[in-house]
């Protein structure tokens, strides 16, 4: 089976020891390895596929912890660089009563932001099925250009390019810059994963049906639309599928969307779907993928953290 590669931030999520409190009222936090691209690698790997991360960490104990976690889950670290120019990024998380989150980031700058395009190599992407990325690392700093180079090389290798905007407004000076970055990178992707909380911000439309013509731009062949406990939908230009969600008593939704798209991409890869055949995936097959990913996501929110909470294929 071909590998997934993900580029962007790997960081430490500090998960609160108590839920239902605002950030300022939380008394203690537990560190957990996170970052959306790293989480997606984790889901793909725990289901049985090979995964490699492209990022940069600080030369500090938090960077050591991330490397240790990647090695524990057998996520490839050959393209994880270290620097003493900045610290490993941190994210403090507070959990509301419904499992949703409040974030505070320590990343001004983070080591991942300083990763240069010069270090990206074409040979990294040989035998890659997917390159996945998010919007967190698309600000006006070197990592943005590293993304552009990675996307170019991955496309040349025949990989599917997957983009999850994963909107984090506290990381941006203003919402307009974030929206501009997202709109710049959507046409570079083959798969766009967008949530019900993000659709209006990105397109100005309230429903995916109204917005999909805007989303099918450039190289986009498939739009995956997630609605939390209400399920998910999947679109190509020629087909549509949907699957109901699984309502559970969520303990921690950190990394839930990453669990969904990671498991979705795993299924595509396992079936040998590539960038050339993506547009021809049938509605029946898309429904099967959605149903599995909904179950996978539902299981992931029953435990704290992201990668550590993701089930293996045997557990599924």
Image (tube, helix red, strand yellow):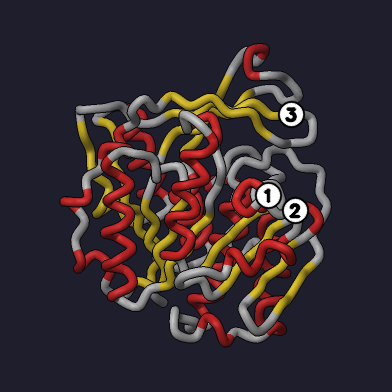
- Report which residue position mark 2 lands on: 206
Q: Which mark is residue 311?
A: none
- Residue 96: image tag: 3
Of the pair 211 and 239, the residue shown nearer to us: 211
* Nearer-N-terminus badge (3/2): 3
Question: Is residue 96 positioned above or below 121 on the image?
Answer: above
Query: Taking the image as drawn, is residue 313 in sight?
Result: no
Left or right, 83 with reference to 276: left
Residue closest to the eye, 124 or 44 = 124
Pointer 3 or 1: first along the chain:
3
Label 2: state its secondary structure. Answer: loop
- Whole-percent x and y of residue 127? 31, 75
Q: Residues within 10 Å of mark 2 (few under 14, many from 20)?
A: some
Q: Are marks 3 and 2 in contact (CB under 8 Å)?
A: no
Q: How many marks?
A: 3
Q: Where is residue 267 shown, x and y percent of the image? A: 56, 73
> How far is the residue under mark 2 from the one under mark 1?
5 Å
| Residue 171: x %, y % from top left | 48, 32
- Identify which residue is drawn at 40% across, 43% down: 137
Front residue of 186/5: it is 186
Give the mark toward the camera: 3 or 1. Answer: 1
What secondary structure is marked by label 1?
helix
Q: Which mark sits nearer the N-terminus, 2 or 1?
A: 1
Q: Nearer the viewer, residue 221 or 281?
A: 221
Quadrant containing the N terminus in the rendered view: bottom left
Where is mark 1, residue-wise? Answer: 200
The answer to whether residue 53 of the structure is visible from this angle is yes
Q: Residues within 10 Å of mark 3 (few under 14, many from 20)?
A: some
Distance from the alpha carbon under mark 3 to that under mark 2 = 25 Å
Give the residue at x 32% y 68%. 154
The reply to whether discs 2 and 1 touch (Cβ–Cβ < 8 Å) is yes
């Amino acid at each position: 089976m071909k590998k997934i590669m993900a580029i962007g931030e790997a960081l430490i999520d500090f998960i609160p020891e108590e839920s239902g409190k605002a950030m300022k009222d939380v008394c203690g936090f537990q560190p957990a390895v996170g970052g959306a691209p790293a989480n997606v690698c984790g889901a793909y790997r725990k289901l049985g596929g090979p995964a490699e991360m492209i990022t940069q960490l600080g030369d500090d104990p938090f960077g050591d912890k991330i490397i240790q976690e990647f090695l524990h889950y057998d996520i490839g670290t050959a393209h994880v660089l270290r620097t003493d120019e900045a610290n490993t990024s941190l994210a403090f998380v507070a959990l509301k009563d419904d499992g949703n989150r409040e974030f505070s980031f320590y990343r001004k700058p983070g080591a991942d932001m300083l990763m240069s395009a010069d270090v990206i190599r074409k040979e990294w992407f040989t035998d890659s099925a997917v390159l996945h990325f998010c919007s967190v690392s698309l600000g006006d700093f070197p990592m943005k250009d590293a993304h552009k180079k990675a996307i170019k090389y991955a496309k040349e290798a025949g990989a599917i390019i997957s983009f999850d905007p994963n909107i984090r407004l506290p990381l941006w000076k203003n919402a307009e810059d974030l929206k501009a970055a997202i709109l710049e990178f959507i046409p570079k992707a083959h798969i766009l994963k967008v949530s019900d909380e993000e659709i209006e911000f990105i397109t100005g439309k309230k429903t995916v049906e109204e917005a999909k013509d805007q989303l099918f731009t450039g190289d986009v062949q498939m739009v995956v639309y997630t609605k939390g406990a209400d399920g998910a939908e999947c679109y190509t230009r020629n087909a549509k599928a949907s699957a109901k969600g699984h309502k559970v008593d969520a303990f921690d939704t950190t990394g839930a969307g990453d669990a969904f798209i990671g498991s979705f991409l795993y299924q595509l890869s396992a079936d040998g779907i590539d960038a050339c055949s993506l547009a021809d995936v049938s509605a029946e097959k898309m429904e099967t993928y959605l149903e599995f990913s909904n179950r996978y996501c539902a299981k992931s929110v029953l435990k704290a953290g992201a990668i550590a909470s993701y089930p293996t294929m045997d557990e599924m």
